Image (cartoon, rainbow, N blue to C red):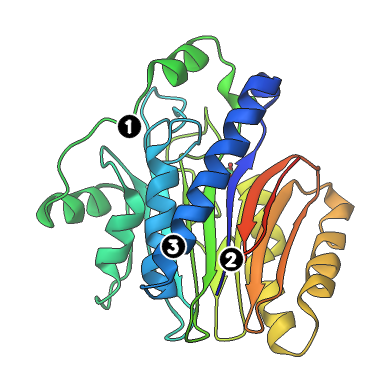
Amino acid sequence: MKIIIHGGFFSESSTDLKTKTAKQEALTAIVKQSYEYLKTHTATETVVYAVSLLEDDVLFNAGTGSQIQSDGQIRMSAALMDGTTQKMSGVINIQDVKNPIQVAEQLMPYDDRVLGGEGATAFARKNGFAEYSTETPERRAEFEKKLAATGTGTVGCVALDANGKIAVATSTGGKGFEMVGRISDSATVAGNYANAFCGISCTGVGEDIVSNATAAKIVTRVTDGMPICDAFDKTFEELKPYDGFAGAIGIDARGKICHRDSHPSMVFASFDGDNVEVFG
Ligand code: ASP
């Protein structure tokens, strides 16, 4: 059993030591709690559990504490992928729900598994998700001061369960100040992808991640036999010609954990049952 989570990148507005320590502590606690959960649950159940905890923590830009878009509203995106069934479900630009990842989970049994905008929000209401404002005073103050554009803090989790199954979940409040209708990478195969060989969750500038097809590319390379960390290296090399801003976490079927970032400030933690590795 293995698990790795990420909490996006440090924003320029929050590089202070206090925030860094708070994020290290939060990620360490959540990765350990999620590992305990993994002992008695599947990889798919566990990534939803871990991402829900991250969404509920206001330190991160997903669920409660999401960034505000250019029109003053919050729209969130989240996706879940089960590496064994190779099915992905997701919501794009959903509004006023506490845990977008849980709405994505609810969509998994349907033929229409990725819903956007009003359709996603209506599906959530129909399925018992109460109206819930994910705005915090801190994000509103950042928005008013036009500071949020420097901040990222998407969350993600990849887990390998006791039966050797892999799953991945990613959730975001977007990049802040985006145009209405923008679609981030998080609920696409560029930002969130898994199969029986590997699972990958990304963070960073959505457009750069989509341009590079980052998660799908790493998974494909591992599937074709490339060692996971080599697949990360090659894929991150390909971001360089356009200075792509991205970070990714992943686990392969043998339990090898890997992470990379193009601009080294990704916030992550992993746990293998013995050791926690947390960003420094
Ligand atoms: N990837 C997200 C987006 O572009 C932002 C992030 O990772 O923090 O919307």
Residue placed under numbered mark 2 in the picture = 273
Cβ at disc 3 under 8 Å from ligand 1: no
The percent coordinates of residue 26 (x first, y second) are 53, 39
Q: Disc number at residue 165? A: none
The percent coordinates of residue 102 (x first, y second) are 30, 56
Residue 94 lies, with reference to residue 48, above or below; the image says above
Furthest residue toward bottom: 224
Q: Are marks 1 and 3 in contact (CB under 8 Å)?
A: no
Measure the C-alpha gap from mark 2 to mark 3: 9 Å
Q: In terms of sequence position, does the residue under pointer 2 or pointer 1 come before the other? A: 1
The secondary structure type at the circle numbered 3 is helix
The secondary structure type at the circle numbered 2 is loop
Measure the C-alpha gap from mark 1 to mark 3: 27 Å
Q: Is 6 situated left or right of 73 in this image?
A: right
Q: In terms of sequence position, does the residue under pointer 2 or pointer 3 come before the other? A: 3
Assign ligand 1 to one image quadrant: top right
Q: Is residue 266 visible?
A: yes
Q: Which is more toward the observer, 172 or 269?
A: 269
Task: Answer few, some or many: residues within 10 Å of disc 2's Cα (few below 14, many 20 plus, some between 14 and 19).
Answer: few
Task: Answer few, some or many: residues within 10 Å of disc 1's Cα (few below 14, many 20 plus, some between 14 and 19).
Answer: many
Instruction: Tell me the residue at 66%/60% (across/down).
Output: 249
Q: Disc number at residue 134? A: 1
Instruction: Tell me the residue at 61%/24% (across/down).
Output: 19
Type of amino acid at the residue the image marks with label 3: Glu
Type of amino acid at the residue the image marks with label 2: Gly
Residue placed under numbered mark 3 in the picture = 36
Measure the C-alpha gap from mark 2 to mark 1: 33 Å
The percent coordinates of residue 30 (x first, y second) are 48, 48
Furthest residue toward front: 274
Q: Is residue 213 visible?
A: no
